[in-house]
Every structure is written in structure tokens, then in C-alpha cells.
């Protein structure tokens, strides 16, 4: 990027990217892309520099709040307890820690607390904190393999970060902010240009876990999506056109003040060029990803402020045209019986996985109702209390108390609107790239957004917001499903076919992500708290 002009308002760039990365029968069947497993990227970022590594406590609190309450509620109004290393360990473990280890072909594979597309784990987490009890102010990278923090900078950069985010008061008042970044090649190895979408899906499911854990600890938290991109990247020492910042999540609350040295620190920010192990033997270039990322970037603080104002003005409920031949409305069943109450959050996260086989069995409508309710109460953004830019359309294959067919979920009125009656198992499989898993699922949820509306309101960066919120919703669907002792699995899809199937009601909508929900056809063992187990493995990578 050069100069002082942002391409954010040139929305044809986002439209072109979205069209170019759509899946169709033709694109899938004519693709020559193959997976070179000898060149598969290492899922852990490793620093070669002689940097300070600070082990996180191996014993830390576990979030005991009811999962459904944790994900349905907004951000806590309380500052909560003081954040210390044990709290930091809890927050990081339950959003990105290692929970399972398996050995396949002589190689160890690790599952994490939140899912990732293709189990490639492209999202890295960085911490920017003020002085905390037991942890000095600085910029840190979270190393899940070692369950440790790598210190990149020493000193309080929270004021600089707040300034980069348009003088964001949530950041300057927070003792700790987590920054989500993507190491792009790690996901592009499999998903190529389309992997830019995955940046936000994978960040969103991690954010869903982190927001829920903050609620358990009564820590105020929100997502920040407006910031000067290249300054965040410089602060973290990210390599240009290989890594990029996605979102910020400040948590906790403290006095709102700016240090007189904050702006000076920002203006004289020393370069940071940490030496890291290259993730694989060679990397292929995908310029379309970086064209889209740069076209949706903000280049100055004033642009951030203007964009944040537009974000705050966007209605949290996008009107959907009524075009319903059945004119049948089905209220959700939100009973409060003990059998419908979810598991504690810690137990849910340790149970979570991506279901690989669904039994062709029915689930109660009451459980589907709680999944829909809990997952769609909105996402806390710093510019507004709760937002909802996406809607859920779904196919019910086997739900006791609900006729088989397709539906639109009206989250404002807590009801389903029947669109088409019929058995659509074959269709739900076909839409999800003809995967039988999604024909066997009891229900398949499609998170969909009105992209033209968001582009007009927010420019190219509206694409980021839509995809990130869809990822958070998907993460909440995972958590609520496993909390109710069901299973869930995310999927990509045939883009235009999804829109066509849900038309005319969904004719203005584009699918962001799909999630199948149902009863797993196997018994998975629960996860564990694994800390510091992979140092030898990663050091040799």
C-alpha cells in the first residue's frame, strides 16, 4: 500500500474477489489443485530469535458458567477480577489451547480448543498488555505448543494500539488486548484464494470461545474491527504479504487515560523483524488474497474514525423481504427444563470436535431452538452493544416436532419461517459440496449476509465484518451443540446454489458458512488440558 488513499470504497474489488472465489460444480471438478503433504505447513509459529519465553501457569481456573448463558449474553458490564498470569492462561487455553493428541503414521497431531478449517490453524494470537500482576507490560506472541508467551516488545503499547484503532476507548481502558492475525500460507496451502474467507471464519470461532470465557470471568470484552492495518502489522512484526491482523479483542476494564508518551511511542516505533522458522519447504503466491486485504485496509486514524461511525450507523437488523408461499411461522421451543440446560463451558470446550459422521437420527426441536437462540444474540463490537449482520437459513432433515423442510430463522421474533416443505437430505448434502455428512445431519444451518448492503454501507471492509461475524456465530453453534451433547461440523458450499435454493426469500443473500448439527455416529473421547507437551516436536519441525 502506498500514499494516503484507501481503496475501501472501491467495492468492485470485493465483488470481484467474492465472485472469483465461489465454488461451483464446474470449479470443483476442473480444479487441478492437489495437496502436497510433504510441503504441508507447520501448525505452530516458531521464533528463532533469542527472545524471552515466559511459561504460563499449568494450573488455572476453568470457566464453570453454563455454556448457553455464556454465549447468549452480551459483554459483561463488570470489570471482573484482576487479570493475572493464571487468568491469561485460562483465557488463552480455552480459546486456542491444545486439547487432544493423536498419533497417525508416526506423527503427532494436536486438536485445539476451537476448530479450524482443515485443521490447519492459521490464526496466531498476540497479547498487548499494561503492567499486570506477575506480567510486565509488553507485546507478546502466544505459543500454544509450549503454552508460553514470547515477548516481542517491552513497555506499555496500549495507548499506541488505541490510537491505531481510532482512539478506541475500549482498548485504552483494557488491561489486556488480544490481536488475531493470519499466517496466510498455512491455510492457502489447501484452500488457495478462497482461504481469505477462512481467516475470518477461523478467527470467529476462536473469538466465540474467548468471549464466552470472558463472560465466565465477568470480564468486559468486545471485538474491534476498525484499525490502521499496516501499523498493527508493524507493531507485531508481521511479515508483509505473508501475515496480517484481522481483529482486536480488548478485555477487562480500567481507568481511561492516555499516557503523554503514547503518541511519541507510536511515532518512533522501532522496527521489529523477528526471525521465524518458515512454515514449510516452499510457499505459493496468491495475489488475489492480498489484493482483497489491501483493498479493505484503512490507512490513517481519521479513516478508522470515519469507518467506525459508519459501522455504528448500520442497522443491526437487515430487513428481509417476505415471500413465503406457506405463510407458516413456528415459534422456537425454549423450555427451561433441566434436560435442555447446557454443560459448563469448560466441559463443553473439552468435548468439542468437528463431527466426522452423523447418525441419521432426530434431535428434539427444543435443542435446535436453544442452539438458534444462543448463537444469534449478537456479537459485541466496540462501536455498538450487539450487532447482527447475518441471518440463518436452514434445512431441517430430522427434527422431532418440526416438519422437514427449509426455513428462515427470524431471530428478532424467536421463530422459524417455513420456506419449503419436503425431504431435502440430498439437497443439504449437495449444497455442502456433495458431502454425505451434511445429508446425514439432523439440520444444516447456512449463515448468510446481504453483501451488497454491507458493501454500500462499509465498503470492502464490510466483507471482513460479515465473514468474521459468521465465524463467531459458527463458533457459538459449535459450543451450544456440544453443550447439549450433540455434534457439529462446519463446511464450505456451492455459493450460488445455496442462494438459489433459499430464493426468493434469500435471493439477496450470500452464504458465509454452513454448519451441520446432529447426533455423532461414534463416541469421541473428551479432550484434556495439554500444556508444554510439544516443545520437542515443534523445535524439530
Image (cartoon, grey):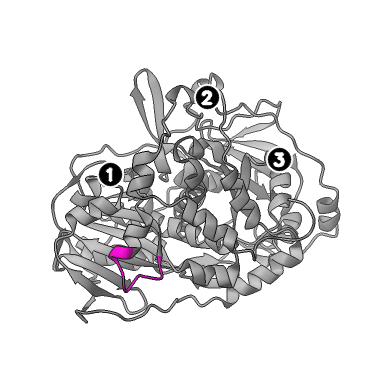
Find the distance from the CA under tag 2 to the CA under tag 1. Answer: 27 Å
Residue sitting at x 74%, y 41% = 153
Q: Earlier in the sequence, mark 2 or mark 1?
A: 1
CB within 8 Å, label 3 to label 2: no
Find the distance from the CA under tag 3 to the CA under tag 1. Answer: 36 Å
Foreground pick, 294 / 372: 294
Foreground pick, 124 / 51: 124
Find the distance from the CA under tag 3 to the CA under tag 2. Answer: 21 Å
Say which element carries label 3.
loop
- Residue 484 visible in the displayed image: yes
For disc 2, the marked residue is 538
Label 2 crowd (10 A; few <14 / some 14-19 / many >=20): some
Magenta segment main secondary structure = loop
For disc 1, the marked residue is 355
Task: Give the residues drawn in magenta, as a range.
Answer: 500-509
Say which element carries label 2.
helix
Q: Disc 3 vs disc 2: which is toward the camera?
A: 3
Q: Earlier in the sequence, mark 3 or mark 1?
A: 3
- The vertical placement of 270 against 509, above or below, is above
For disc 3, the marked residue is 237
- Residue 486 visible in the displayed image: no
Q: Is residue 128 left or right of residue 108?
A: right
- The vertical placement of 387 against 529, above or below, is below
Say which element carries label 1.
loop
Q: Is residue 506 magenta?
A: yes
Amino acid at each position: 500500500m502506498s500514499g494516503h488513499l484507501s481503496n475501501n470504497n472501491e467495492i468492485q474489488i470485493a465483488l470481484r474477489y467474492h465472485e472469483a472465489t465461489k465454488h461451483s460444480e464446474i470449479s470443483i471438478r476442473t480444479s487441478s489443485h492437489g495437496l502436497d503433504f510433504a510441503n504441508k505447513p507447520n501448525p505452530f509459529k516458531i521464533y528463532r530469535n533469542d527472545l524471552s519465553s515466559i511459561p504460563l501457569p499449568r494450573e488455572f481456573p476453568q470457566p464453570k458458567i453454563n455454556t448457553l448463558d455464556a454465549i447468549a449474553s452480551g459483554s459483561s458490564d463488570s470489570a471482573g477480577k484482576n487479570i493475572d498470569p493464571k487468568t491469561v492462561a485460562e483465557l488463552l487455553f480455552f480459546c486456542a489451547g491444545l486439547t487432544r493428541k493423536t498419533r497417525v503414521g508416526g506423527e503427532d497431531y494436536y486438536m485445539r480448543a476451537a476448530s479450524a478449517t482443515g485443521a490447519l490453524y492459521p490464526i496466531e494470537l498476540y497479547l498487548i498488555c499494561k503492567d499486570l500482576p506477575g506480567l510486565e507490560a509488553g507485546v507478546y506472541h502466544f505459543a500454544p505448543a509450549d503454552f508460553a508467551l514470547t515477548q516481542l516488545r517491552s513497555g506499555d503499547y496500549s495507548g499506541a494500539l488505541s490510537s491505531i484503532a481510532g482512539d478506541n476507548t475500549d482498548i485504552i481502558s483494557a488491561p489486556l488486548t488480544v490481536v488475531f492475525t493470519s499466517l496466510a500460507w498455512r491455510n492457502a496451502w489447501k484452500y488457495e484464494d478462497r482461504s481469505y474467507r477462512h481467516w475470518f471464519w477461523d478467527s470467529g470461532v476462536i473469538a466465540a470461545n474467548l468471549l464466552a470465557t470472558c463472560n465466565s470471568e465477568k470480564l468486559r470484552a468486545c471485538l474491534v474491527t476498525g484499525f490502521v492495518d499496516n501499523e498493527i502489522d508493524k507493531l507485531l512484526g508481521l511479515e508483509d504479504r505473508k501475515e496480517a491482523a484481522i481483529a482486536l479483542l480488548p478485555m477487562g476494564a480500567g481507568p481511561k487515560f492516555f499516557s503523554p508518551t503514547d503518541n511519541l511511542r507510536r511515532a518512533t516505533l522501532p522496527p521489529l523483524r523477528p526471525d521465524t522458522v518458515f512454515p514449510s519447504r516452499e510457499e505459493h503466491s496468491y495475489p488475489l488474497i492480498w489484493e482483497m486485504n489491501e483493498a479493505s485496509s484503512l490507512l490513517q486514524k481519521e479513516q478508522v474514525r470515519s469507518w467506525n461511525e459508519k459501522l455504528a450507523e448500520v442497522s443491526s437488523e437487515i430487513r428481509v423481504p417476505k415471500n413465503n408461499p406457506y405463510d407458516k411461522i413456528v415459534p422456537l421451543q425454549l423450555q427451561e427444563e433441566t434436560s435442555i440446560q447446557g454443560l459448563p463451558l469448560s466441559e463443553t470446550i473439552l468435548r468439542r470436535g468437528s463431527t466426522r459422521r452423523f447418525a441419521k437420527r432426530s434431535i428434539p426441536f427444543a435443542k435446535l431452538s436453544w442452539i438458534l437462540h444462543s448463537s444469534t444474540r449478537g456479537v459485541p463490537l466496540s462501536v455498538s452493544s450487539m450487532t447482527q449482520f447475518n441471518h440463518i437459513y436452514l434445512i431441517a432433515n430430522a427434527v422431532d416436532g418440526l416438519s422437514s423442510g427449509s426455513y428462515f430463522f427470524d431471530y428478532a421474533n424467536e421463530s422459524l419461517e417455513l420456506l419449503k416443505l419436503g425431504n431435502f437430505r440430498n439437497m443439504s448434502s449437495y449444497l455442502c459440496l456433495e458431502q454425505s455428512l451434511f445429508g446425514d445431519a439432523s439440520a444444516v444451518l447456512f449463515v448468510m449476509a446481504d453483501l451488497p448492503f454491507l458493501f454500500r454501507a462499509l465498503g470492502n471492509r464490510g466483507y471482513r465484518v460479515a465473514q468474521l461475524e459468521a465465524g463467531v456465530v459458527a463458533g457459538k453453534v459449535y459450543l451450544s451443540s456440544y453443550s447439549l451433547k450433540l455434534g457439529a461440523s462446519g463446511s464450505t458450499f456451492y455459493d450460488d446454489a445455496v442462494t438459489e435454493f433459499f430464493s426468493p426469500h434469500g435471493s439477496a443473500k450470500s452464504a458465509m458458512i454452513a454448519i451441520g448439527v446432529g447426533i455423532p455416529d461414534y463416541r469421541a473421547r473428551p479432550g484434556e488440558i495439554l500444556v508444554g507437551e510439544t516443545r520437542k516436536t515443534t523445535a524439530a519441525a
